[in-house]
Amino acid sequence: MSDQLSITFCGGAGTATGANFLLSLEDTRDPLRGEKFLIDCGLLQGPKVADDKNRQPFPYDPKTITALFVTHAHLDHIGRIPQLVKDGFRGTIFSTGPTKEIAELSLIDSLGVLEKEARGSKQPLLYHEEDVRRALTLWQTVGYHEEIKIADFTIIAKDSGHILGSAMFEFKYKDKKIVFTGDLGNSPAPLLEDTEPITDADYLIMESVYGDRNHEDRGVRADRLEDIIENTMKANGTLIIPAFSIERTQEMLYEIEKMMEESRIPLAPLFLDSPLAIKVTEIYKKYAKTFLNEKVAPVVASRDGIFNFPQLRLTLTTEESKAITATTGRKIIIAGSGMSNGGRVIHHEKHFLGDPKNALLLVGYQAAGSLGRQLQDGARSVTILNTPVAVRAKVVSISGYSAHKDAQNLLEFARVASDKVKKIFVVLGEPKASLALTQKIRDYLATDAVMPAPGEKVVLD
């Protein structure tokens, strides 16, 4: 076999979302031979949960894909999997156990928003629930460092420390190792184990969401969280936290519970107003002993267990959610979506942003064009559900709670890999962030780094 190994950047190049990478082993003499592996198959996102570009055909034939490896369960990494299956993919899907369980919840949950967007644009739905169910029948779970053998490849998952069950995938072929990081966690994190170092990869495909900026110090982020809660509660106001249902919500619950128990903030009702976040939190409880770090072990083993305290109110139904606005007195609301581009949080923002005694706390990445980015950038008036809303509430951003590594830690991750690595491909970031990280890797580490173009195919040595 005259083999040629290549990577095609089908999605996630030049943008922070839409992760979709194709690793191909081709026989240059017989195109019918070889293997094709996808790493992630996510939605391209922006002002809408699903950008219209997601309707374009895949740049490969889904029927020819051997296997799909899923790094973690955020929609920008899993959101097109049902579409892939609908278009003929019948290979195996590999991920950790938590990723599969959270992905099922996320994909089913997202259907409602996708249906609404499809109606608004008068376009067909990307996929249906039966496509999600069919995808799950192809799904196989693996543990960290468990070997997967496919033809001449050995593939293992390593802990990326990003969200529960998140993984980097290492592909070994002959004497070469190619590692796809997915998203890299902001270690050390309150709940998760640290990101595993990569020391022996020949090629590294790494994320760069925060490639051009650093987070606050971890001590500062906790102090700022404490201050915004304390000040808003003392004003008898409402604190709204738009949070992604996976990881950010659970981190917020853990930190706020700890602060209340230590009497660092006033006691107040905390409404977890997201059916998806409530269900995901149950998955965190299920895997707490095997996937969370040692720091939370005493809480997990305690009588009440993790994510279980008197002030917590779980609002599953729409009626319970609507009733929150009628609740008088100080309160905290955690609701999705994290970028305020859908979900229940926009109803709370519409109701509460006009009052100066209230506050909005942004604790995650806000994509360009999203309502969250408008608020983060200081907009004094926004349109929510076709209604103009004056922004009089205090808007605070704490980047230290991001689930992504910042520029300094991304560079350190690359430094550890740089002794062996031949080339680093910088992806999954807005162009400014990716270019900044690419340049730093070249300048500070004297390592070959490039920012691939969307759709670019690179043949590996």
Image (spheres, rainbow, N blue to C red):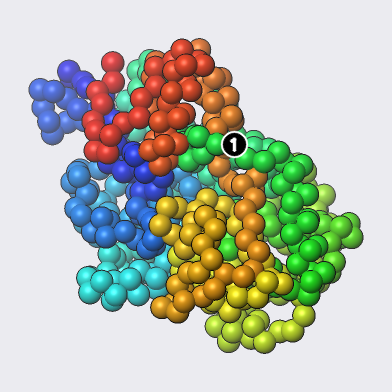
The image shows residue 454 at horizontal and vertical percentages of 27, 38
Q: Of residues 57 and 96, which is closer to you in this image?
A: 57
Can residue 97 be seen at all in this image of the molecule? Answer: no
Q: Taking 370 as reference, is 297 above or below it? A: above
Task: Give x and y (percent) for residue 171.
Answer: 40, 28
Q: Amino acid at mark 1?
A: Asn
Residue drawn at the location 35% of the way across and 75% of the way down: 116
Residue that numbered label 1 is attached to: 214
- Label 1: which secondary element: loop
Q: Residue at x 59, y 30 (%)?
A: 409
Up-down relation of residue 444 to residue 101 (above or below): above
The residue positioned 11% from the left and 27% from the top of the image is 30
Closer to the camera, 331 or 176? 331
In the displayed structure image, the side of residue 345 where residue 64 appears, left or right: left
Residue 159: image quadrant is: top right
Q: Quadrant of residue 431?
A: top left
Instruction: Please indicate whether residue 165 sits to the left or right of residue 6 in the image.
Output: right
Give the quadrant of residue 383: bottom left
- Vertical order, 256 against 152 (above or below): below
Q: Estimate how packed mark 1 is, as few (under 14), some (14 to 19) or many (20 or more) residues with alpha carbons within 10 Å.
A: some
Q: Which x, y percent locates residue 286? A: 65, 57
